[in-house]
Image (cartoon, rainbow, N blue to C red):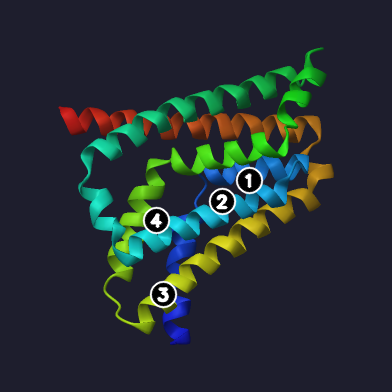
């Protein structure tokens, strides 16, 4: 197994995973609250491993050619991102209202709810299919034999390293990140980011049909 190919996979995987998105925002939020944050990082990493493997070992072409699947995922992603953005705005707004305790209670959820949330931000994210599965799959598919496994290993390692670093870092810095003004700023930035991604998905749908 070539170490150079592993490093290639790691660096390329990092460039696909690290840019801020729904997954990262969710992992960051759970880490800040120390609310099953390691479970969140584990679920996101395992799902990435599944989809990366699917893409590199043959599933990328199927997904890229399945317009119905991409349409359904995109519609689900728009709905979820819009709702997540709304929740982030609501959280930012209620930091200065008497209803903050109830909001905090809603956000500090059970392990099952956290896992379901991690599933949603991953599976309902069209960029996962287009970037991680299709692009990484097409590149990884160019390798043969052990080198393909080495490339897959590198990209999967990038996912685990990033999500655990983000989760543990957010938990470590939780006393700072959860200060009202800082937390409010983060919530607003996340909300704006979610709405922008949702708008780009809507634009993509419009271009697809018109």
Q: Where in the figure is residue 168, as x and y percent of width and height?
A: 73, 55
Precedes in sequence: disc 3 or disc 4? 4
Marks 3 and 1, how far apart at CA: 25 Å
Marks 3 and 2, how far apart at CA: 19 Å
Precedes in sequence: disc 3 or disc 2? 2
In this picture, is 33 found above or below 10?
above
Circles 3 and 1: CB distance less than 8 Å? no
Circles 1 and 4: CB distance less than 8 Å? no
Query: Within the image, what quadrant is residue 103 found in?
Result: top right
Which label sits on residue 27?
Answer: 1
How many marks overall? 4
In this orientation, does residue 155 appear? yes
Q: Secondary structure at mark 2?
A: helix
Circles 1 and 2: CB distance less than 8 Å? yes
Precedes in sequence: disc 1 or disc 2? 1
What residue is shown with label 4? 132
Circles 3 and 4: CB distance less than 8 Å? no
What residue is shown with label 3? 151
Marks 1 and 2, how far apart at CA: 8 Å
Q: Where in the figure is residue 88, as x and y percent of width and height?
A: 62, 27
Query: Within the image, what quadrant is residue 5 found in?
Result: bottom left
Circles 2 and 4: CB distance less than 8 Å? no
Q: Is residue 97 left or right of residue 201?
A: right
Name the residue at 72% across, 24% down. 106
């Amino acid at each position: 197994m070539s170490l150079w190919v592993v490093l290639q996979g790691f660096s390329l995987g990092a460039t696909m995973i690290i840019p801020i998105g729904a997954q990262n925002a969710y992992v960051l939020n759970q880490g800040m609250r120390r609310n099953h944050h390691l479970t969140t990082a584990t679920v996101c990493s395992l799902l990435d491993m599944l989809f990366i493997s699917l893409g590199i070992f043959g599933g990328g072409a199927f997904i890229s050619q399945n317009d119905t699947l991409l349409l359904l995922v995109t519609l689900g992603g728009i709905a979820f991102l819009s709702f997540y953005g709304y929740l982030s705005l609501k959280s930012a707004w209620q930091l200065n209202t008497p209803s903050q305790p109830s909001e905090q209670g809603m956000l500090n959820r059970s392990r099952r709810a956290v896992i379901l949330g991690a599933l949603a931000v991953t599976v309902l994210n069209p960029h996962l299919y287009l970037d991680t599965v299709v692009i990484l799959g097409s590149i990884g598919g160019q390798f043969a034999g052990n080198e393909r496994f080495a490339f897959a290993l590198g990209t999967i390692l990038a996912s685990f390293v990033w999500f655990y670093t983000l989760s543990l870092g957010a938990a470590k810095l939780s006393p700072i990140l959860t200060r009202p003004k800082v937390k409010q700023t983060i919530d607003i930035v996340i909300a704006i980011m979610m709405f922008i991604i949702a708008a780009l998905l809507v634009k993509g749908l419009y271009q697809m049909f018109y």
